[in-house]
Image (tube, helix red, strand yellow):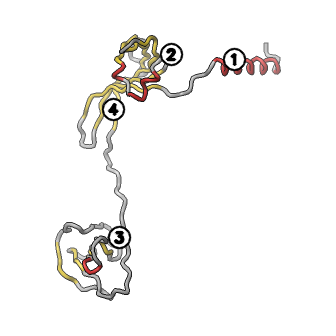
Amino acid sequence: MKPEPLQTVSSPQKGLSTFDTPDLPLIYIDDFLPPDRHNVVNHNAESETIYSPPDDSSKQINAPVVFPRTPPLIQEHFIPLQKWEGVVDQVKSDYFIARLVDQTGTTPDELAEFMLDEVSKGDRTLVKPGAIFYWNIGYEESLGGQRKRSSIIRFRRLPAWSAHELEAAKHDADRTRDILNWR
């Protein structure tokens, strides 16, 4: 049994869902209202027609169909201008000194001084002599296209080799060399 039309509207009203898929059946929405106040929207017509459900209380009202949001085509992203790989040489009370290798190959190696405040809190425990990090300078571009110049320092989180592990690897290499008679 088809519900009777109540009124016709040319645009969605507050509390109504809109669906762009014409193949969908009529869907009951506003599930939080009492059953006599539910509305149904038919988007197959040229204008949207709002229906009231039939008075047949034996019919079960199904939950509304929810479509996941599609991510925006333009996402926030970082546009690099310059990249370095750095190795920490010295750590002082509020700064550290590092040797930088240019990843774009346009400048020679350099020494640089960084304030510890420039390092994210999660990476500060990694700032030790010999630690490897990456420094990128570029633009952060927001969803709206707004550009902001940024400097990003990320420390590498690979586990360091212990002295025992290095000694064991050297022993294994010596043993393999002896088995192969490679002198």
Give neighbour class at mark 3: few <14, some 14-19, many 20+ (Cα, 10 Å): few
SS type, badge 3: loop
**Res 77 label:** none
Most foreground residue, 136 or 56: 56
Seen at 25% across and 81% down, the residue is 52
Give the residue type at disc 1: Glu
Ranked by sequence position, the earlier of labels 3 and 1 is 3
Which mark lies nearer to you, 4 or 2? 2
Seen at 27% across and 28% down, the residue is 149
Q: Position of residue 168 (x, y in %)?
A: 71, 20
Q: Position of residue 143 (x, y in %)?
A: 27, 43
Most foreground residue, 168 or 175: 168
Give the residue pinned by disc 4.
79
Q: Position of residue 120 (x, y in %)?
A: 38, 27
Q: CA distance from mark 3 to mark 4?
A: 41 Å
Left or right: 169 in relation to 114: right
Give the residue pinned by disc 2.
130
Q: CA distance from mark 3 to mark 1?
A: 64 Å
